[in-house]
Image: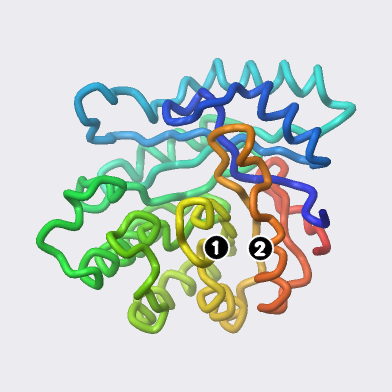
Amino acid sequence: MSIISDCHVHSTFSGDAESSMEDMILKAIDKGLQVITFTDHCDMDFPYKEGEEGLFDLNTDSYLYDILRFREKYGDKIEVGFGVEIGMQTSCADKNTDYVREHDFDFVIASLHLVDGYDPYYPEYYEGKTEKEAYGRYFELLLENIRLFNDYDVVGHLDYIVRYGKDKDANYRYEDYKDVIDEILKEVIAGKKGLEVNTAGLRKGTKDVHPTYEILKRYKELGGEIITIGSDAHRTDNIAADFDSALKVLKEVGFEYYCIYRKRQPLVVKL
């Protein structure tokens, strides 16, 4: 496998994950990875449903303690990165910025998990909306949020919304949202940020990685260069899942390199 790093991995420090940090590390070693970057969830102001309270509230001190502990234990076998997946909302852009600056992260993913207070994982978000309205609103809010919050390294799973729509990506086309997606890409490039290629959608019934071939092609056409690769694994058997698909798409688009982040700086690796 020519991809040596998985830069989007969750452990049980995220309430929706199933495997411990140590088990994830051991699986990554078993799969021949040289780098694993943990990016557990920090979603401030999340509107929890009853019984879900605290799922995405990260205990950062305990999290870092375990990362340092396992760096020492497994440092001769794998590099363990200290990352975070920030859940963007316009209501907490300043709090997210303060939080990121208070910690010495290696890597920060900016993701949108909520649309107008609704988690698109649940069907109620789509009630009373056409697919284009539901997906279009997601992209509008993503653009709004990355204009407010810019202390990140890459945008995570840019078209995340298509994982959970009624027909997923069966009818989804970049061209239908081109205007707003192009603005997102231009903001990312102007800010010297990057895009994540996220393979989780393939496990959840989509036809393509996040974002799609068409969006990655457009990103490159506009001058985008920074790419990271992540499985979005929440359990051990998802580590580096479908990385062969990510590699194929990136090569078809024409990318020759991807990045691993250390201390918020990209290290370029040849595909």
Classify residue 101 as left or right of residue 107.
left
**CA–CA distance in space, label 2 to label 1:** 8 Å
Query: Residue sitting at 72 percent across and 29 percent down?
Result: 25
Classify residue 122 as left or right of residue 55.
left
Query: Residue sitting at 57 percent across and 25 percent down?
Result: 19
Q: Residue under label 2, please give it.
A: 245
SS for callout 1: loop
Q: Quadrant of the C terminus?
A: bottom right
Q: Which mark is residue 128?
A: none
| Between 245 and 142, the one nearer to me in the picture | 245
* Residue 104, percent from left and from top: 62, 32
Q: Residue under label 1, please give it.
A: 209
Count neighbours of disc 1 (C-alpha within 10 A) and say few if under 14, some if 14 to 19, many if 20 or more: many
Mark 2 and mark 1 lie on one chain; the one further toward the N terminus is: 1
- Look at label 1 and name its amino acid: Val
Classify residue 2 as left or right of residue 191.
right
